[in-house]
Amino acid sequence: MATEIRLRVLGSGSSGNASLVSSGGTTLLVEAGLSGRELVRRIRLAGQRPEDIDAVLISHEHGDHCRGALSFAAPRGAPIACSAGTWRCVRREGRAPTPPWVELRPRAATRIGAVTVTPFATPHDAQESLGFRIESDGAAMVHVTDFGHLDEEIEAAVEGVDLLLIESNYDERSLFDSHYPPRIRQRIASRYGHFSNGALALYLRRRLPRSVRTVVLAHLSENTNTPELALETARQALDAGGRTDVRLLAANRRELTEEVLAVSPSAARRAFRARRFIARSLFDPGAVPVPAKAGRPA
Ligand SMILES: [Zn+2]
Ligand SMILES: [Zn+2]
């Protein structure tokens, strides 16, 4: 039985997003915002075979999430799982044949092989955009980007998960100082635009559930953010909130991010006990039972 979910970000940023999520022999491509050819290349770089993708999950119809969806999925017959609103837009852009469609609805759990996907609605200027809670035998993670504010739906979805991939799109000052036209700036900063480093910091400091042990910062803007800035802002917030236990990574658009795991709470407890035992053994040799030897008092 699989007690872990493996996440590998193939690329993430305002120009294109894609991740691999695998558990128990099932592999999902979450977002297909790179060209079909580039998706194939990065899937292979991650040590997987494109033909082994069981389904393609798409959060919404913006090009940085669905650019390669049809050209990747159609020739392989891989189903695309997304909302009805997203599917209408994605399908319109493609030429026949279209791959099979699995309809995702907010709060309706859908089983795909060994994993269960429970989508939730996100506040974004798109047709029925979604975030994904993905579970497998007790292990749980959330994959959520492209939202203007963090509402109750998102907060509820993150409850109890071990791994959180979340948007840290822009630095407020950099956006203010940017050369974007005011209309674009307003769109990004609106309640249906994107999530900033500062807004994420507030959440990480005050409201991040105790269960979350790894946070992956994603969908960083190329023009109004840097991985260093996003990581520093998030780290300070976590430290201020007493969450020095949380591991923090930033995904980027050019390269694959290292593989990270979501493990079930029971597996995490077992690993914690094992680590504590090893630590005790190292620092307190007396705690390790030593078999009695001949000539030495037991
Ligand atoms: Zn979007
Ligand atoms: Zn996007």
Image: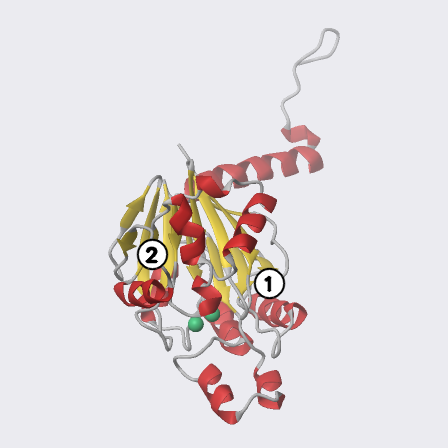
Using the rendered view, name the quadrant where residue 156 is placed: bottom left
Between 176 and 198, the one nearer to me in the picture: 176
**From the viewer's perspective, is 248 left or right of 94?**
right
Q: Which disc number belongs to residue 96?
A: 2
| Residue 296 point in image, percent of width and height | 73, 12
Q: Nearer the viewer, residue 52 or 238?
A: 52
The spot of residue 39 in percent (x, y) is 53, 53
Q: Which residue is drawn at 39% across and 32% down?
A: 1
Q: Which amino acid does label 1 sit on?
A: Arg
Q: How crowded is mark 2: few (under 14 residues within 10 Å), some or many (20 or more)?
A: few
Label 1 CA crowd tier, 10 Å (few <14, some 14–19, many 20+): many
Check the image and name the residue furthest to the bottom: 182
Query: Is label 1 in a helix, a strand or a loop?
Result: loop
- Residue 187's x, y, as percent? 45, 85
Q: What residue type is labelled 2?
A: Ala
Residue designated by label 1: 253
